[in-house]
Amino acid sequence: MLHRKQETLSHLYNIEMQTSNTKKKFPFRAYDMVNSCDEKDPLIASWSKDGRYFIVKDKGTFEKKYLIEIKYASFVKQLNNYGFSNITSIIQTSGQGQREGEYFCHDNFRKSREDLLRNIVRKKTKDKNEELIHLSTGDGLVKRHEQDEDNERLREENKVLKEEVKLLTRHILLSRQINRPIPSEIADLRFLNNIVHRYIAYGDWSTHTADSSLKFYYPHYG
């Protein structure tokens, strides 16, 4: 008999410790809010008749009076993060609920069943390792490995192409600079051409105007 009492006390102590450690978690805070509304402000939020889900009837007042530090949208996001389902459309379609308000449920979120709350855990975000584990089913891992190799090869080819484009661009610019004299060189060439033109026309270095029939080709650049 004494041993059974000790086990009972130990069990109650463990429950109390678990509750104190998890009381601050979101499911417990949400549970307290719904309970408080159900008792004091049922027109704002309440449990369903069977206690299997809860209804937020007045979002604005619920946000101002009970959420205080966070927005209603953040509250709904937290519910989603902990695996709650928004069953508003289901309830309203079935004709069981009122038109206004939102309905949420979770298998471990029930009226007068606070003991179930510790079973509500936050969803884990998928990371790369989980993705690899998921892909390892069948030939998924092999396909992922092949895809990674293809991507790496494409990156290398892209890098080589970029270098080739740079070299080709540099070559074109250099060719243009070599084949196109600067303006001062063009002026010198035209001056010398003019002198040779007069010499051929008059047999000397006269400055007389050359015959118009004697013309020289002046290369034009630019």
Image (cartoon, helix red, strand yellow):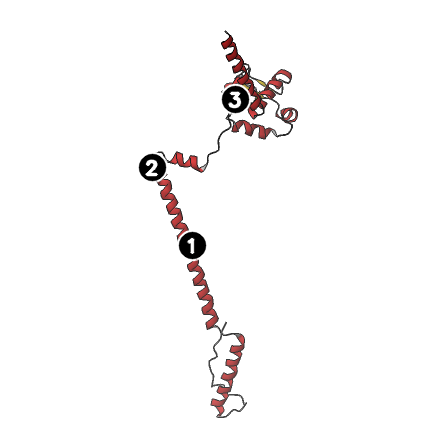
Residue type, mark 3 in image: Arg
Name the residue located 54 percent from the left edge and 26 percent from the top edge.
79
SS for dot 2: loop
Asked if the residue under mark 2 is in contact with the one under mark 1, i.e. CB atoms within 8 Å, the reply is no
Asked if the residue under mark 3 is in contact with the one under mark 1, i.e. CB atoms within 8 Å, the reply is no
Q: CA distance from mark 1 to mark 3?
A: 54 Å
| Apparent side of residue 162 relative to residue 13 in the rendered image (left or right) | left
> Mark 1 or 3 closer to N-term?
3
Q: Is residue 142 above or below residue 94?
A: below
Residue type, mark 2 in image: Asp
SS for dot 3: helix
**Percent coordinates x, y for residue 151 in the rendering:** 40, 47
Label 3 belongs to which residue?
A: 118
Label 2 belongs to which residue?
A: 139
Of 70 and 115, the residue lying toward us: 115
SS for dot 1: helix
Q: Which mark is residue 159?
A: 1
Q: CA distance from mark 1 to mark 2?
A: 31 Å
> Mark 2 or 3 closer to N-term?
3
